[in-house]
Structure formats: structure tokens, C-alpha cells
Amino acid sequence: MYATLHGDSLLAAPPAPQRQRALGRLVLEATASGGATRVLNLSESGPSRIRLPRTHGGALEAVMMNTGGGIACGDIMHVQVAAKSGSDVVMTTPAAERIYRSDGAVSEVHVRLDVESGARLEWLPQETILYEHARLRRSFEAEVAEDATLSIFEAVMLGRHARGERITHGLLDDRWRIRCAGRLVHADNLVLDGALDALLRQPAVMRGHTAFATFLHVAPDAESRLEEAREALAGAECACAASAWNGRLAVRLLAPEIAPLRRSATAFLTRFLGRPLPRVWHS
């Protein structure tokens, strides 16, 4: 503690003010009703909001918004989505999510998805952009019924390509755990930490590229759609590959920057999912 001498008394310097950090929480439960999917329960807190645009068809489209404009060091966000039996839900975001520079504190994003019998849930946010010195820890958990369908797409851009920014230091700690009928079918851990420039240039890591994405499809017919997925990836503008096993299908994409990856992903997702992407993807 620092102190200053004032007259005959020793006065302690005032402590540094504590930062106000954002704590956001979204909870959405959707149910099938009259041939369409409707909101059963919705709660929002902090900077987290959901908007429900009018759409055609039976699916419920939910746009997740962060009124803070991005995630700063130490912010914590929670998202919980439950697709009840027979429902059809599409989750997305209006734009890329930005993870700002941190002077040490780690931001956290926690996602929990539950997909009940006969339900379909598509998790299709736009890309996450990590700024130089950003620090993010993210957990992704899902429980899927044996006859339900869960499709997840997550894209990450390291640095702001348009400004010539390249990440040299930062943290991305990404943990996925997907269970089907209580059985663990997919576990994925990615940790990029510390001095990243040399690490990202390694051929076995990212070969100097800065944009990557994962698509995961968990469904009764997931493995049988492998060739269909590979055909849908034909002509992609980025490096990509698909594999299927243990009741799920996975696609990985890698590109020098986000634009070709986004174009490739848009074409693939539209064809594989069998319907247009949310309108916010094209705005």
C-alpha cells in the first residue's frame, strides 16, 4: 500500500477503483405448438438480449444480442437454450462478437444446450473476433436426445484482418462436451495461450492462417451424410475436411482470413441444412 505524509499524520492512498464488469445471462425455452415453434420461457439480464424476428416456416429464429457492443476483460456471459420435444429452433447473432484486449483478466462465455426428443436446434452465431491480447475462456455443453438433431457452427478470427492486426499474444481456451442420450459423443479442447505468433505458424496448428471454424452435426443420420457433406464442400475457397463417427459428423475449415471462410461456410450450411441461413447473416 502506498502512503503520503500529510501534516503529522500518515494517510493511506485510496485503493484503485474496482472495474465494473458485465454479467449477461440468456435463458430460452421453446416448445412445439400448432405446427410451429413458440417461446415457452425467456429471460434476459445484463447486456444480453434476444430478439425474435418474424420468419416464414415453423422454426423459431432467435437473435442473441450483446448491448455492450463486445466482451471486455473479465465480462462473463451465460446462454442456456432448451428445445422441447418436436420444436425447431435457430440461434444466431446480428454480427460478429468482439473480444477486446485484456490487461490480464479472462472473459468467459458459457453455453448450455438441451435438445429433447424429435427436436431440432441449430446454433449458428456469426464469427467471434479476438483482438490482440484478448483473453477468452469458453465452455460449450449440450445434451441431445437420441432422436433429436443438433447442428453447431462456430467460427473464430484471430486479429482484425481489415486493420492489419495479427495476434501475437492472447488466450483462447475452448472446451466442448456433447452428450447424446447421456453418453459422451464429442469432447474437444483447444488452448492457444501466451506467445501465439510462432505457434500459429506451425504446420500442425494453423500454418499461419488466422480464421478457423468447426461445424458439428449430431443426429440419427449424421454418419450416413458424410459423402453429402463432402460434396457440399466441393469448391470451397478454404482448406476444409469432413469426417463422421460415433453418431456425429464434423467439418473443419481453415482460411487466411474470415471472408473466404465465411463464403465457404455459407454455401455449405445452406446446402447441408436444407434451408437459408438467418437473414442477419446477409445484412
Image: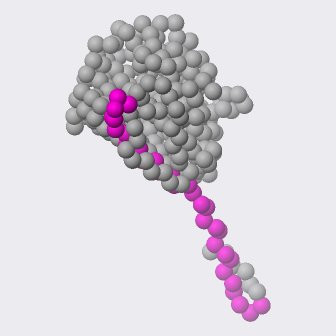
Q: Residue furthest bottom?
A: 8
Quarter occupied by the N terminus: bottom right
Point out residue 126 in the picture as x, y percentages from the top left corner.
54, 31
Asked whether, in this view, residue 196 is left or right of residue 228, the answer is right
Closest to the observer, 85 or 160: 85
User: In the image, is residue 238 above or below residue 89?
Assistant: above
| Quadrant in which residue 170 is drawn | top right
Q: Residue at x 40, y 27 (%)?
A: 58
Q: Which residues are magenta?
A: 7-36
Q: Residue at x 74, y 84 (%)?
A: 5
Point out residue 133 in the picture as x, y percentages from the top left corner.
61, 43
- Is 31 one of the magenta-colored residues? yes
| Quadrant in which residue 80 is drawn | top left
Residue 79 in view: yes
Question: Total marks drawn?
Answer: 0
Closest to the observer, 261 or 24: 24
User: In the image, is residue 53 above or below residue 211?
Assistant: below
Quarter occupied by the C terminus: top right
- Is 251 one of the magenta-colored residues? no
Closest to the observer, 37 or 14: 37
Point out residue 9 in the picture as x, y percentages from the top left corner.
71, 90
Point out residue 44 in the picture as x, y percentages from the top left corner.
48, 51
In this picture the colour scheme is one colour
| Quadrant in which residue 15 is drawn | bottom right
Q: Residue furthest front?
A: 34
